[in-house]
Image (cartoon, helix red, strand yellow):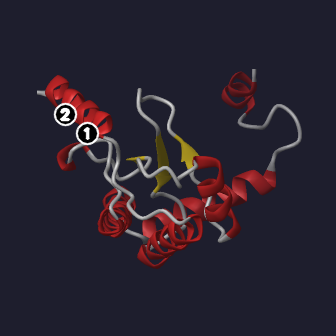
Amino acid sequence: AQWSAMEKSGQWRFTPPTHVVAAFLKALEIHDAEGGVSGRGARYTNNRDVMVKGMRDLGFETLLDERWLSPIIVTFFCPEDPAFHFSKFYDLMKNEGYIIYPGKLTIVDSFRVGCIGRMDSHVMQGVVSAARNALETMGVKSAAPPKAALLERQRLSELQE
């Protein structure tokens, strides 16, 4: 109905959402200043690369092989260490200002971390630092996943070929 009114009269059907239009125009301006889709994509890719390297340095493993990693969100396997409990890890990350997401699409325990939004490499380094602090607080000695997780990654990789 809104589009029909706009097509017929060139006007909004009801009171125009001026604040939404102004915010949208500002978002387009910021997007353009960053270099458009390619510029933003490069920042997201760098965010991913910084975070993945740091998390791997801690012992975490990604669900997907390198070539399948997304610059949007990355899934990591939960550590096999018996001291690791996702709910505690989640709370510790949240206490440092980082919200992570439980894995939803795998048969092994995992969690996801987003790489998009108004974040840069410094924020992603903060994610890694918060994860390190959480592991230390929990007494997790190794962030390595269980063997079943690595087998699942291999299975998924074979499906993609």
Q: Is residue 109 left or right of residue 9?
A: left
- Helix or strand or loop: what does disc 1 sit on? helix
Q: Which residue is mark 2?
A: 154
| Identity, as a three-letter code, of the amino acid under mark 1 | Leu
| Vertical side of 63 occupied by 71: above or below | below
Q: Quadrant of residue 2?
A: top right
Residue found 44% across the figure and 65% down from its top:
32
Q: Quadrant of the C terminus?
A: top left
Q: Is residue 41 left or right of residue 10?
A: left
**At which x and y percent is residue 82?**
49, 49
Q: Nearer the viewer, residue 134 or 140?
A: 140
| Vertical side of 87 occupied by 41: above or below | below
Q: Is residue 137 left or right of residue 114?
A: right
| Vertical side of 106 occupied by 69: above or below | below
Residue 102 can be seen in this image = yes
Q: Which residue is mark 1?
A: 150
Q: Which mark is residue 100?
A: none
> Circle 1: is it few (<14), some (14-19), or many (20+) Cα within 10 Å?
some
Q: Cα distance, mark 1 to mark 2?
A: 6 Å
**At which x and y percent is residue 54?**
35, 70
**At which x and y percent is residue 138?**
58, 64
Q: Quadrant of residue 128?
A: bottom left
> Circle 2: is it few (<14), some (14-19), or many (20+) Cα within 10 Å?
some
Residue 73 can be seen in this image = no
Instruction: Kindly check if marks 1 and 2 are in contact, taking CB atoms under 8 A apart as contact.
Output: yes
Q: Extreme front residue here?
A: 82
